[in-house]
Amino acid sequence: MSYKVRIKATGSYTPKRILTNEEIAKTVDTDPVWIYDTLGIKTRHIADKNECTSDLALKACQNALKNAKMNVEDIDLIIVATATPDRSSPSTAAILQGKLGEIKTPAFDISAVCSGYIYAQTIAASLIHSGFIDNAIVVGAEKFSMITDWKRRDCIFFGDGAGAAILEKSNDESEILTQKLYADGKGWENFTVPGGGSENPISHEIIDQNLHTFRMNGRAVYDTGTKVLPKAIRECLDETNLTVSDIDHVLPHQPSWGVLKKISELSGIPWEKFHTNMEHYANTAGATIPLVMDEANQKNKIKRGDIVLMIGVGSGWTWGASILRW
């Protein structure tokens, strides 16, 4: 027997500190106006030194549980999508579980960077669909400021934050209609953190060269995202027998206005259906989709029965798409 799956509730959290383009321009050769006009970013939130990824995730989960009117003891599974874990071991999900309370809920991380939430949601929904669990909390949480070289021009792209969604069995028309995941490992060098892993373990040399911070080929990100996501959207529409006009909302990963507007053009989905918040939060990687989803949900922009499309592309390359009826 299989079960339908829906999103019951959402929650999010962003750190208090706000870093503006103008502040960055004081130490990096960049133009605040260009950043906004090209990328759509004005500010980003930056976590405190003593604020870990699990702390951001904790607050997003607590908000989601409050909105769902559920206790943490009711949750059957915790998945955290993150590229910036608290530690290499244990998982951030395990640390989060311990912070949530005296529970024994299974918990694990996945790493797919900006498409991480879609990957995690697909895993959780599949387990609910099969009847293995009744519900799950899926979190996208990132502290990208800890792997950013603030002397490089690409420091403008990312911010910190977390978003969470509670998935459960559905007994009504609300349900996830389809989810698709993809990867192409040939693109792994286009967005990477060279140091800190088994290939290049942490050393004085790695730190001196800032190889523990991210490196990004912005042109490759643009070219890949605008190539693979319109195709993924088409495959999801075909599988659900829906058309572009049936889509009411697009909840995308937040790479830049340029990438998303090109995807809008190529897919035929009007730009006004795309929800964006990079103006205030920049790109929060695995947290982008659940963060923008919670924002739209809390403002009642998404109504019951609306058809919602999620899309994201991340390092690897990894990408994914999902369509659900709210």
Image: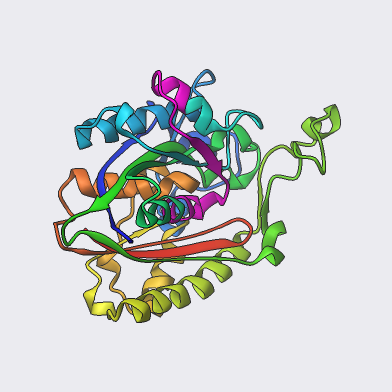
In this rendering, position of residue 293 left or right of residue 141? left
Q: How is the image coloured?
A: rainbow
Q: Where is residue 61 drawn, in percent x and y?
A: 35, 32
Task: Between residue 22 and residue 151, name the one nearer to us.
Answer: 151
Question: Is 218 located above or below residue 117 in the figure?
Answer: below
Q: Can residue 120 be seen by looking at this rendering?
A: yes
Residue 241: name its quadrant: bottom left
Q: Residue at x 71, y 66 (%)?
A: 186
Name the quadrant containing residue 162: top left
Answer above or below: position of 194 versus 317. Answer: above
Image coordinates for residue 16, horizontal then vertical, percent: 37, 26
**Residue 26 in view in this figure:** no
**Front residue of this view, candidates 137 and 22:** 137
Q: Position of residue 261 (x, y in %)?
A: 39, 68
Quadrant for the C terminus in the image:
bottom left
Q: Which residues are magenta?
A: 97-122
Q: How many numbered discs?
A: 0
Instruction: Return the residue nearer the eye: 35 or 130.
Output: 130
Write the residue at 27% across / 51% down.
169
Q: Residue 67 appears at what percent x and percent y?
A: 21, 35
Locate the N terminus and report the quarter of the image it occupies: bottom left
* The image quarter in which residue 263 lies: bottom left
Verify whether residue 157 appears in magenta.
Answer: no
Residue at the image point whose x is 20% and y is 43% from the top: 298
- 324 vs 44: above or below: below
Q: Decide whether residue 119 is among the magenta residues.
A: yes
Q: Residue at x 46, y 41 (%)?
A: 79
Q: Is residue 37 left or right of residue 87?
A: left
